[in-house]
Every structure is written in C-alpha cells, then in structure tokens.
Image (cartoon, rainbow, N blue to C red):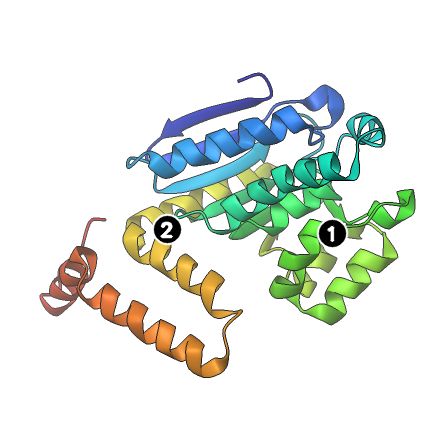
Amino acid sequence: MQYLNTSIKERIGTITLSRPEKRNALSYDLVTELKEAFQTMAANDTVRVIILQADGKVFSAGADLAYIEQLQNNTFEENVKDSHHLKELFYLIYEHPKPVIAKVHGHAIAGGCGLATVCDFVLAAKEAKFGYTEVRIGFIPALVSVFLIRKIGEGRARELLLSGELYSAEAVQQMGLINKVYPAHELEARVNELAQQLIQNNSGQSMALTKKMIAEVQHLETQQALNHAAQLNAEARGSEDCKRGIAAFLNKEKITW
C-alpha cells in the first residue's frame, strides 16, 4: 500500500497511517487503503484486536484540503458519491467485528478526529489535541456528527462541532470522547497492554456480538431494542465460546481465548 503500513503480530493487527508529509490527511486514496486494510483484518482469523496509529508528528489533520478544492468542480452527484466513500470507512470501523484501539500520539483534527471517534477505544498522548475545525473553513462536520452525538450526547457534541476549537486530551477525556491520557513515552506500552487484556481475557466472538448489539439497539424503540437484545442473548448462549467460558468458570479453570 502507498499510504499505509500494516502488520500482524501476537494476534494484534496494526494499521499505520503513513502520509506524514501531508500530516496524514485523508485523501480519496488513503481512505480506499484504510477500507481495504480493515476489511482484510476482519477476514483474518488470527487477528483479534486492531490498533490504528500514525507516523509523523500528527495523528491526522483531517481531509486533504487540496483534494477538497478539486472537488469543488464536481457535480453535486459526484460529491455525494465521494462523501459516501468516507462514510463507508467510518461505518466499517464502527461496526467492525473486532475491537479497534486508536493510538493518538499527536493532533487529531476534523476528519482525523472523526477517525478516532469511531474507534472503540481511544488512548492519547497528553500533548495531543482534538477538535472539529470544519466550521472555520466554511465546511461542516457532517459524517462524524452522527457518531459523535451517539458517543458523547448532543450538548457536548454541539460544543465541539460549533466552536471549531482544539481541545486538550484531558478536556476531551472528560467529555467522554477518549478513554485514557498518558505521557507520550508510556502510550505505546499502554495501548499494547490494553490490546493483550482484550485478547487474553475476552471471547472474540462475544466482543463481536456486543459491538453488533451496541450499534443496532440505539435506533430501536425500547421494546424493540429489548426484544432484539433477547434474541442476541439467546444466540450467545448457544455459542461455542459461551459453552467453553461457562464450563471453565464452573470448573475454576483459566480459559485461553
């Protein structure tokens, strides 16, 4: 791949944005490669957890503005098609069957912040800043708003999306946008530690089903959501992982997932 590096080690799939000279800006081709990488990791049974990280000083500065300038010559229909390209990436990560950890060592801005938002866990260096700056250039944070409101609620999402300001890692942690903040020199070890905890302690099948449930129940009316959850509950009880897990617990044995 031209703009990404990928690797698999100890059941961890790592996807690294590698366009540092452009601050890992999200061009059409980079989004294409990200979609391919996440689809490949989904199909690989040896991968249990995915880490999304980046080369250079910045995690991602968002959309490639030179590319957006070119798109201004497109027809409305062509721009709708292009927007769906990024939408598909966000949704692919959000509904990915494997937990995705964003390791944010540097600033995550606009679409780059959106990329982190759709991950299951976001661990950041203390120096990193986060924000949706689209309104400051006459653009809008359209796609990410759908996920951000779900994640942190309308009130805090309004503050982030309408202000266009950059916030410290500690500030967005308090808002619920990210999970943990660490000194930069500790970040890699903490991310790997979390990945290994997920791999060793949790059923991959159960995590996939839980992610599916979280994504699906939110748009349902309460009774419909409960009925759907009951169906998933019954499905989980019959799974091989559940049988193994219950047996190990009752026999006071440590299970190896």
In terms of sequence position, does the residue under pointer 2 or pointer 1 come before the other?
1
Residue bearing mark 1: 142
Cα separation between marks 2 and 1: 32 Å
At label 1, the amino acid type is Ala
**What x and y, as percent, mark residue 104?**
62, 41
**What x and y, as percent, mark residue 166?**
82, 49
Q: Of the residues tagged 2 and 1, which is closer to the observer?
A: 1
Nearest the eye: 200 or 38: 38
**Quarter where residue 60 is shown:** top right
Helix, strand or loop at label 1? It is helix
- At a point 11% along the width and 64% down the height, the residue shown is 247
Mark 2 Cα-neighbour bin, 10 Å: few <14, some 14–19, many ≥20: some
Q: Is residue 198 left or right of residue 105?
A: left
At label 2, the amino acid type is Leu
* Count of numbered badges drawn on the protein: 2
Mark 1 Cα-neighbour bin, 10 Å: few <14, some 14–19, many ≥20: few
- At a point 16% along the width and 66% down the height, the residue shown is 246
Residue 103, compared with residue 17, is above or below; it is below
Q: Is residue 219 left or right of residue 234?
A: right
Res. 188 visible in picture: yes
Residue 225, compared with residue 116, is above or below; it is below
**What x and y, as percent, mark residue 231?**
30, 71
Helix, strand or loop at label 2? It is helix
Residue bearing mark 2: 198
Res. 183 visible in picture: no
